Amino acid sequence: MSKFFHLKFKFCYYLVICALAFGFSLTGCSSKKLSSKPTINVWHWMTDREAAFQELAKRYEDKTGIKVNFELYAPSDIYAQKVRAAAQGRTLPDIYGLLGEKRDFAAFIKSGHVADLSEVMNEENGVWKECFFSKALEVVEFKENNTYAILPGIYGAPIDIMNIQMLYNKKLFKKAGLDPERPPSNWEEFIDNINKLKKVGVPGLVSGWGEIWMIDCFASNYAFNIMGEDKVIATLKGDVPYTDPDWIKVFSLFKELVDKHALVSGVVIMKNKVAEQTFANERAAFAFNGSWCINVYDGMNPHLEYGVFLPPKVNRKNPMYIWGGGSSFSFLVNDRSSKKLEAIKFLKWLTDKDQQAYLSSQTKNLPSNKFALAEIPKILAQFADGMDSATHPSIWPVNEFPGVIEALGKGIQLILIKEKTPEQLAQELQAIKEKESSRIVSN
Amino acid sequence: MRIFKNIYVKSIIVILCFILAELIYQKSHNLRFISPIIILLAVALLIILVTKIILAKQFKSFLFIVPALAIFSIFYIYPFIKVLQLGHYSWDGILPTMKFVGLYNFIEVIKDKVWWQSMFNAGYITLIALTFQNALALILALACDRQMKAGNFYRMIFFIPPVLSEVVVGLVWQWIYDGNYGLLNHWLVALGFNNLTKAWLSDPHTALTCVAIVHSWKGFGWGFVILLAGLQTIPKQLYEAARVEGATSWQVFKNITAPLMIPVFVLVAILTVLGSMQSFILILTMTDGGPGFHTEVPVTRILSSMIGSSRFGYACAQSIIFGAILLAISFVQKRISQNMRQA
Amino acid sequence: MQIYRVKKTFTNILVHLLLISVSIACLFPLLWMFGSSLKTQATVFSDMSIIPQQPHFENYVTAWIDGGFGRYFLNSLIYTFTVVFGIVLVSSLAAFAFSRLEFPGRKAFFIMLLAAMMIPLPGSFVPLYVLMVKLHLVNTRLGYVLCLINVGLSFSIFLLKTFFDKMPKELEDAARIDGCNRLGIYRHVALPFVKPALAVVVIFNALNVWNEYVLALIIFNSKNLMPLQRGVMMFRGEFLTNYPLLMAGLTIAALPIIILYLLMQKYIVKGVISQAIFQ
């Protein structure tokens, strides 16, 4: 009997502990203080900007008394899921960043999660609108008669921008007897430079081609250069097949890079962060990388001497295009938020010249406000020059199916390991493209 | 009559609980957190009630699994049914509208060559884990089961890989496998095998095996710990008796250890299969499925169709097919083990 | 006798060689992590020595402060303690019932629990989140804890049931003769018998909860509720990773689990069985 009692006692004891633990954990979240001034909640995924955002939030509170609460959720792929889940649960914050393609952006707008800012942007002769780089604004803009059937308007405010270009190591250039102030201007010169560099034992190009979006970026740059913008768009629309000789020429560039041993070994599965290590430690002469790299190289090798140039042209008649803008670096306002007006006001303040200059100096990213460009480092200014050549899938009138984009990236990886020829890839892509289009029609 | 009365009263309590929870939630902001607890209690009570009516006799036995069942049915059944349902829709995961497409998603998954390649890759990783990883775990567990001075030290060391973050594991092994500056190539050259050096992770012939080795390296600690725990439950008297009779180590293992350990072997085997088939974080950090589709596994495919292509319904269909295959494998394993035990 | 001894020493050497070589393979990344945490961002990939000439121990202080580890550490302790406690209690009760008790639907429920381990988690995030919103469990500690208990339950029940199955029938009968009821057998006979397995369950779930990050990110909105891994993530940006601080953070995060494992080890290896028999 006493044994039984003992047992019961112990069990109750456990239960009490359990209840206490739960109680304790619950009190932690019920201690929210209600203040009279509204708090604007912002969700984002940009770890490197967190400190600067917190500082700006403090400044805004000092100025207006409105508290801005920045919440950071990284890494980006989980953030993307969180935002989608929150959209389903109707628990999106007042301001948030969205990761995804234009199609996902359009779906968010259609579901009523995004406020149209064009009215505020155009107020007072459009002072707010005018301060942005036009390329940056286009990314969050939907024009008349767009393919997504969205009402025309501007659905977000770009916080900063980026573009992806070629970099070269000046020290290694000198070592190979090349002019460190004269990067290659066309493809033949580029290959020639690499050959010269190889003779002194310097590997050529490094890039994060283990991430297929970097491959997609490189390939579409050259597609624009080789066949011109209209033909690329026509391919996306389905009017020109991927088996077109121009496209095979694009894929053949990758084959040429492999055949001439112009790439650092292992580039085919290399994450961009590893590629950055390689370039920063002077183990490659060229890198294909975005403007965020300034910060990275600065930390890893402060003595690195490098310059920026547009990817070398293949077709000298057409201009070279690069990816730039970046819708992921924009903030959207939740249309269902009760603090919508305050949120828009805050965004307007955040993209103002002073705040943009501060953000840019702290994070070494390109500001989206063109008036904030005055005091940026030289290398960043070189990147900024490239904005004229910038384009981005988000501003094209049509977008490729995700399935085709994946097959393109993965297929080029297979070219890089010599498992596929450019012709085979072209045929496969066309087959996948036809399959995807038929699915959309049959659905 | 009394039982009926009792149940009657309790059902009213359950209903009242639900109403109370709803009221608290709507009326008071500060006390909101109470309502889920009340709902939880009510659900538990409801389950108790239902089962009490059905099985009054074995009710007390059933009580043992009520907490597990309550948590399980709240947090698992609903998402599961939802996934099952969404598998039949074409939906991007965002829009409020979705389109019913019947079995279309499932048929497309079955027709998808890349999906089956990812399945094969996961199977290959699992096979290496089952043989290589578990053999290593067993040998080390047997070695550490013996009374040894340094036993504590080894037992601690072998648990390091499971504790380490995938980030560190990925970075270190990438460095080992690297084509230019890698440690593996360095050692091969030092040993005179110059012609064997290569960029291990980007070569399609070696990429998958390399990933599988890292996976086994990271996972063997678990098998080791579970097997060790299993070995500990074998009464020491049995060993002593065998030793008195002059049995060799191999005979002891064959006649005493192995038969008693079969359930634990089966457990470890099933856990290895589940763990290896569902592994993906290491692959994401090391190769991201590349080169091409050579190291792609089912979970990375599901993730890419969910986030990359925004085809939520399709991703759900993939999840269901994947789950069904895993369930089938586990049942076959259980069957085989039952036959083994009877034999 | 002589031959026997030679043979024994020989196998001993062989066994130790194997143990040592595996140990080196296990220790190397740990040392690399520790070494990297003492370097600077500029030297972390250029200086290949394991322990650098000028160790920067201040990285640990920086990581602790910049990552806001104080709060996250406490949170993680709360979560790990509650979840592991909940799982051990709930799963051992259920596993005992599945293994030792008779009730209708026993097999069906067990198969259902097993099936839960098969469907990969990523697919069910959105439905799970919507459910949590409906239950008002989003952004609460309770919701997170219950979710994690659910995640670890299947594995733990499966593992414990295997070990309960191994318990000799005689033990149970003896206890019954002594006047123990079902709960008594569970508490005084069965639980001590599976102590090694319980230790494995504790370590496995503690490690899972300690390293858990994805669910926390989805369920919590406020950083005040986030677990330790959130602090570590601060150093692992989308574009910029601060490797020395990341490694310092990861080392700090790994320590408690290693300590827990050391504590649990004695339950795994001490011959518990003999005590249980003669009790």
Image (cartoon, helix red, strand yellow):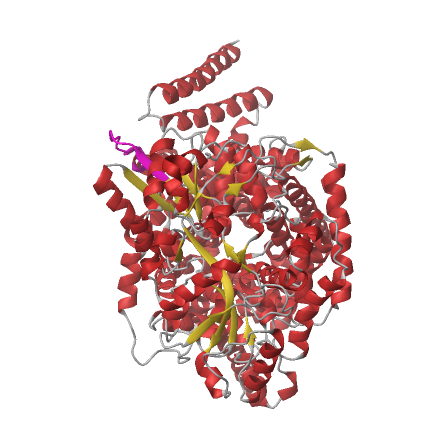
Question: Residue A353 in the image: x percent, y percent?
Answer: 32, 50
Query: In the picture, residue A321 is in which quadrant?
Result: bottom right
Coordinates of residue A223 in the picture (x, y in percent) = 65, 61
Q: Residue furthest bottom?
A: B192
Observer able to see residue B116: yes
Please tell me which residue lies in front, A167 or B80: A167
Task: Please tell me whether residue B69 belongs to the stretch shown in magenta.
Answer: no
Q: Quadrant of residue B292?
A: bottom right
Question: Is residue C27 found left or right of A29 in the rendered image?
Answer: right
Q: Is A6 above or below relative to A356? A: above
Q: Residue at x 41, y 21 (%)?
A: B21
* Residue found at the far top of this picture: B1
On the rendered image, what quadrant is the N terminus of chain C found in? Answer: bottom right
Q: Position of residue B69 (x, y in %)?
A: 53, 34
What are the residue bounds of the magenta stretch? Answer: A28-41
* Looking at the image, residue C1 lies above or below residue A377: below
